[in-house]
Amino acid sequence: MPRKAADQPLAAQAPVTTHCLVRQDGGLTIRLIREPWATGALATKALALRHRGTATTIELPLVPAEDGAMEARLDRGAHRLAEGRWDVYQVRPGKRRRRLAAGLCDSRALVNAFPDLRRPLETWTPYATDTGELSLAVRARTMHAEVTDVVSASTGLTVHGLLINLPEGRPALTLLAVRRVARRAAASLDQDELTAPSLDQDEETAPSLDQGEETAPLLDQGEEAASSLDQDDVPGARIALRAQSHLDGRFSCSVPYQRLLEARSHSHEVWDLYLRPGEEGQEGEPIRLGRFCDDIAERKGVERYPHQQVEDALIRPFYTAGNELSVRVTPPPVEDESAV
C-alpha cells in the first residue's frame, strides 16, 4: 500500500532539494533547487543554521542563481560557528522554519586538505542525517592532535598524527589514557559508538527554534561529559606514557595493551586518549586525539579496527560519535553451549 506523504521521510516528499559545496577556501555554498513536480515559486529569502544544544541561530540571505536556484554562502571570514552540529532550515515567510532535504554534499575539497599547523583548527563538514536532512559537523579547537594513522597489533596501539597550533619545535608530550567512569563504560558494549540522539525532524513537530533551552546534544557531549581527568580517582584511572614530537609538526605515541589490563578495574572499560604538552611541572591542558581533517563527518561506522585478544580481554580502538579516538576493553563473548 502506498504511503501517505505525511508518512514518508522528509527527503522523499520535500519540494526543495538542497545541495552543499565545500569550496577550496573551506567555505560553503548552499544551493536550493525546486523539484520539477513542485508548483509555485521558491518562497524563501534566507536559510537558518541552528546549533543543537544552544539554539543559536544564524540566518544566511539567499540570492538568485542559475536555473532558477537560490544560493547562500557561508564564509570563513564572515561567520564563526561554535563546535557542534548545525542543522539547516528553510525560512518561510509567515510560517515556521522547516528542515531541508539534503541533495549532493560535495566535500571533495576536504579530502586532501592539509591543516594549517600554526592556527587553531576549525572544520565545517556537511552531511546528510539518517533521515535525509542537511546538517553541518563543526569542530573548533584552539589546539588539536589530529590522528593520521592508527595501527592496532597484538601488543598495543600506535598512533601517528599532526600537532595543530602547539609551540613550534619539538614540544615535550605525554600521552594520557584516561578511563571513563565505570557506569558509562560498562553500560553497554556498543553504547559509546552509537550516534548521538538526533533532532532531525521537521519543525512542525520539533521544538520551536525560538526556544532557548537545550533540545539536543552537542556533537561531542557524549565524550566531553566524561573527559574530565579527575572524574575517576581510583588508582590506575590515568596512564601516562611518553609521546614523541617531531620538527615537522608530527607526533607519534603508543599504548601497550598490557598497561590497560594492569590498570583494569571493571569487565568493560573505555579509555579516552589525550596528549598533554609541557615539561613535568609545567604541563598544559590535555588535548583530545581525534580525526577531523577530511570529509567524513561520522567515521565510527566507516573506520573500524579489529579486536585484539590479550589474555582474558578483547581490546579494540574506535572512533567515538565525535570522531575522537578511544580504546575499548571487554571480556570475550560467552559461548552458548546449548547451541552446540
Image (cartoon, grey):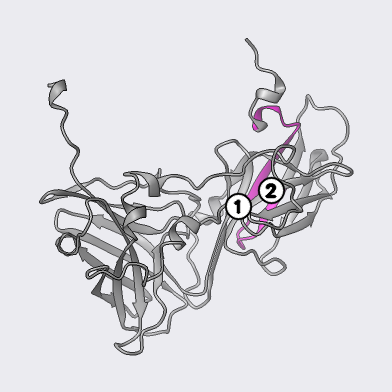
Apparent side of residue 339 relative to residue 218 in the rendered image (left or right): left
The residue depicted at 29 percent of the width and 87 percent of the height is 280
The residue depicted at 60 percent of the width and 61 percent of the height is 26
Quadrant housing the C terminus: top left
What percent of the width, then of the height, locates residue 5?
A: 71, 22
Magenta-drawn stretch contains 29: yes
User: Label 2's element?
Assistant: strand
Apparent side of residue 316 relative to residue 39 in the rendered image (left or right): left
Apparent side of residue 234 relative to residue 323 in the rendered image (left or right): left
Q: Is residue 70 above or below residue 12?
A: below
Q: Amino acid at mark 1?
A: Leu
The residue depicted at 40 percent of the width and 82 percent of the height is 284
Q: Is residue 224 above or below residue 154?
A: below
Q: State the extent of the magenta-drawn residues as a range.
A: 11-30
Is residue 43 in sight in this rendering?
yes
The residue depicted at 70 percent of the width and 27 percent of the height is 13
Q: Amino acid at mark 2?
A: Val
Q: Are marks 1 and 2 in contact (CB under 8 Å)?
A: yes
Magenta-drawn stretch contains 129: no
Q: Quadrant of residue 234 in the image?
A: bottom left
Q: Quadrant of residue 148 in the image?
A: bottom left
Q: Which mark is residue 136?
A: 1
- Depth order, front residue of 106/62: 62
- Depth order, front residue of 63/328: 328
Residue at numbered disc 2: 88
What percent of the width, then of the height, locates residue 256?
A: 18, 63
Q: Quadrant of residue 49 in the image?
A: bottom right
Is residue 245 in sight in this rendering?
no
